[in-house]
Amino acid sequence: MPETSAVPPPPAGGPGALFASGGTLVLDGGLSNQLAAQGCDLSDPLWTARLLADDPGQIQAAHRAYVRAGADVLITAGYQASHQGFARRGIGRAEASALLRRSVDLARRAAAARPGVRVAASVGPYGAVLADGSEYRGRYGLTVRELTEFHRPRIEAVAAAAPDVLALETVPDIDEAEAMLRAAAPTGLPVWLSYTIDGVSTRAGQPLSEAFALAAGRDEVVAVGVNCCAPRDVTAAVELAAATGKPAVAYPNSGERWNAAARRWEGAPAFSPALATAWQASGARLIGGCCRIGPPAITALRAALRGAA
């Protein structure tokens, strides 16, 4: 991938621009799923973020696969990226910031293949950077202030690349959600806030109604909802999210469970594009897939949503 090539500018618009076209927007699926299909080794603690430094062309190719599949929004490879994580690989702070910006630029180049495709800069939870599965537990023993200080530099870095929206995603508890929102506020960018859940609770066991209420009164939050959760939990969560008065976002995984200790997926897949019509009817305006959901499922998802419109 030639780094000297121009990066297409982001579409114009403020916080409401994400929904300017009306209707439901189709998100992409699991970036890791497509990268694995392309033969990439994701066993590194940096996960997909390793490729920002080692093989960025693979990331751009994965994004392009989702554009071809019909995604309206591409989520970047920044989920597990942080200055601390890159430092453990001997990458300095300035270069780490450049790699975080690159995550947005790669998605922007891929998005240019079809007019109107948007770019959401992924900001994953603190637990993802630990690479030990703790994003599915939360409650790391850190204060909101400490978590804010962790997230602020990485959010500032991706914000400098002008994504259309910040995807504060796979958030396991309310404290981290508050910290991420505080860190994102000075950027002036719109955000969506998406929790990982178990039933109608956050992974830390807090009621989802309380978790979603955090978004109330924050104009920069353009959508609130769930991701990286079981498909069966989405409809109830979307109904609770829609009660905030904001559009809901929903992109569950396949229904299989990640065994962090054994480093493998377990259980049977339960994701079906047909389920998305119920999420749409309940108030979801951003719908896609997370782990183990690849381009074919996104194509089928788009067809199901368009058929229900």
Image: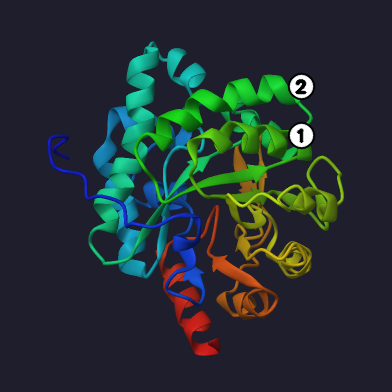
The residue drawn where x is 48% and y is 76% is: 22
* SS type, badge 1: helix
Whether tag 2 and tag 1 are in contact, CB under 8 A, the answer is yes
Q: Which residue type carries mark 2?
A: Thr
Q: Is residue 55 above or below residue 73?
A: above
Asked if residue 21 can be seen in this view, the reply is: yes
Q: How many marks are shown on the rendered structure?
A: 2
* Residue 136 drawn at (x, y percent): 72, 39
Is residue 176 found left or right of 210 in the rendered image?
left
Q: Is residue 43 visible?
A: no
The circle drawn on residue 189 is: none
**Left or right of 154 on screen, residue 61:** left
Asked whether, in this view, residue 158 is left or right of residue 2, the answer is right
Quick one: SS at disc 2?
A: loop
Residue 197 horizontal/vertical position (percent): 75, 51
Residue plotted at (39% across, 31% down)? 100
Task: Tell me the amino acid under the disc marked 1.
Answer: Asp
Q: Which residue is mark 1?
A: 175
Q: Residues within 10 Å of mark 1 (few under 14, many from 20)?
A: many
Seen from the viewer's position, the closer of residues 219 and 107 is 219
Please name the residue that numbered disc 2 is placed on. 143
The answer to whether 163 is drawn above or below residue 295 in the figure is above
Q: Residue at x 36, y 38 (%)?
A: 103
